[in-house]
Image (tube, rainbow, N blue to C red):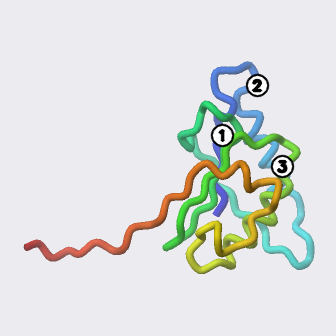
Amino acid sequence: MLLVCRTCPRDRRDTGSFGDAVRAVTRAPAADDEAPTKALYVNCLGACDLPGNVALDGIGKSRVRFSGLAAEQVADLRTACAAYDASPTGDPGEWDVPADLRPAISGVAPKRGPRSSARP
């Protein structure tokens, strides 16, 4: 799942324009061999100092955040989503992060294991 900040850039006249650029790419028809890109638009991904924030997230996988993305880099997100979805843990070392996106990785948050309901 692609999480997209819908308020980037914040505190500017063009607030939300980054999310609009991502929406245009993710809603475009996918290539025949490409799965559709599922996107969830969220209010903030916690990197407001570098507008242009997205994250890849999946059940049981690390969340990988990219920050400071420009509109020209948005097309690479489809490739990144497919590679991330095919990886078992989502850790950037085990899937092919597009070269243009590698320097934009601003956070990797591994998932915690299941919590036990038993109390000592």
The residue shown at (58%, 45%) is: 42
- Circle 3 packing at 10 Å, graded few (<14), some (14-19), many (20+), is some
User: Looking at the image, which residue sits at the far left?
Assistant: 120
Residue 17, placed above or below residue 89: above
Give the x, y percent position of residue 106: 61, 48
Disc 3 marks which amino acid?
Gln
Amino acid at pointer 1 = Arg
- Looking at the image, the residue that sits furthest to the right is 32
Q: Position of residue 11 (x, y in %)?
A: 64, 21
Q: CA distance from mark 3 to mark 2?
A: 18 Å
Q: Residue at x 70, y 63 (%)?
A: 38
Q: Which residue is mark 3?
A: 73
Badge 2: few (under 14), some or many (20 or more) residues near its Cα, within 10 Å? few
- Residue 6 image label: 1
Q: Earlier in the sequence, mark 3 or mark 1?
A: 1
Of labels 1 and 2, earlier in sequence is: 1
Residue tagged 2: 14
- Establish if 64 lies above or below 10: below
Q: Is residue 63 left or right of residue 23?
A: left
| Quarter where residue 119 is shown | bottom left
